Image (cartoon, rainbow, N blue to C red):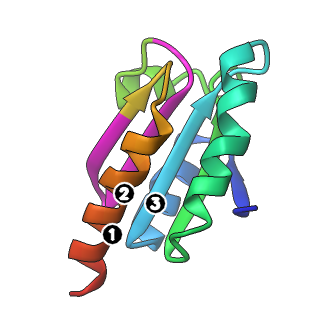
């Protein structure tokens, strides 16, 4: 399963996004049952993309994340490429569609 880096401040989040060409940010809360169901599926999908790095933010610990990334519900899945938000999914994620989107974007940008 895809490795996941815990991100505990806005600074660590910004650094994570800057350090990796492909940064995937997963924002959740401990009491969110949907979040607990989404994460294992997300990690399996991301296993196909070795250069996408996965970071996790607990929105309860980093409350500022809501304002910084316009988060109104959890879970939120954000893909950044070269520091720019490229893909956003929230709450109920359709994994087949997400996988297809990731494949297209990954092929396009990995070839650079």
Q: Quadrant of the N terminus?
A: bottom right
Mark 3: secondary structure? strand
Pick the residue in front: 61 or 74: 74
Q: Is residue 57 magenta?
A: no
Q: Residue at x 56, y 25 (%)?
A: 75
In the image, 65 versus 79, the foreground residue is 79
SS type, badge 1? helix
Q: Given this view, does label 3 or label 2 mark the residue nearer the observer?
A: 2
Is residue 58 shown above or below 95? above
Give how far across and how far down residue 74 sits, in percent: 55, 19
Is residue 110 shown to the viewer in this render? yes
Nearer-N-terminus badge (3/1): 3
Which residue is outermost to the front?
96
User: What kind of secondary structure does the magenta stretch mostly adopt?
Assistant: strand
Q: Is residue 14 left or right of residue 108?
A: right
- Write down the residue under mark 2: 102
Mark 3 residue crowding within 10 angstroms, few (<14) / some (14–19) / many (20+): many
- Image quadrant where one finds the C terminus: bottom left
Q: Which mark is residue 106?
A: 1
The magenta segment: 73-88
Residue in view at x 44 percent, y 24 percent: 90
């Amino acid at each position: 399963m895809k490795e996941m880096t815990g991100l505990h401040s806005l600074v660590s989040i910004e650094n994570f996004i800057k350090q990796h060409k492909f940064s995937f940010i997963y924002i959740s809360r401990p009491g969110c049952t949907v979040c607990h169901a989404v994460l294992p599926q997300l990690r399996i999908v991301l296993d196909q993309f070795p250069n996408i790095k996965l970071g996790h933010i607990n929105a309860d610990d980093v409350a500022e994340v809501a304002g910084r990334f316009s988060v109104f519900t959890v879970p939120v899945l954000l893909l950044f490429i070269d520091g720019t938000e490229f893909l956003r999914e929230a709450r109920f994620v359709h994994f087949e569609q997400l996988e297809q989107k990731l494949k297209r974007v990954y092929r396009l940008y990995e070839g650079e």
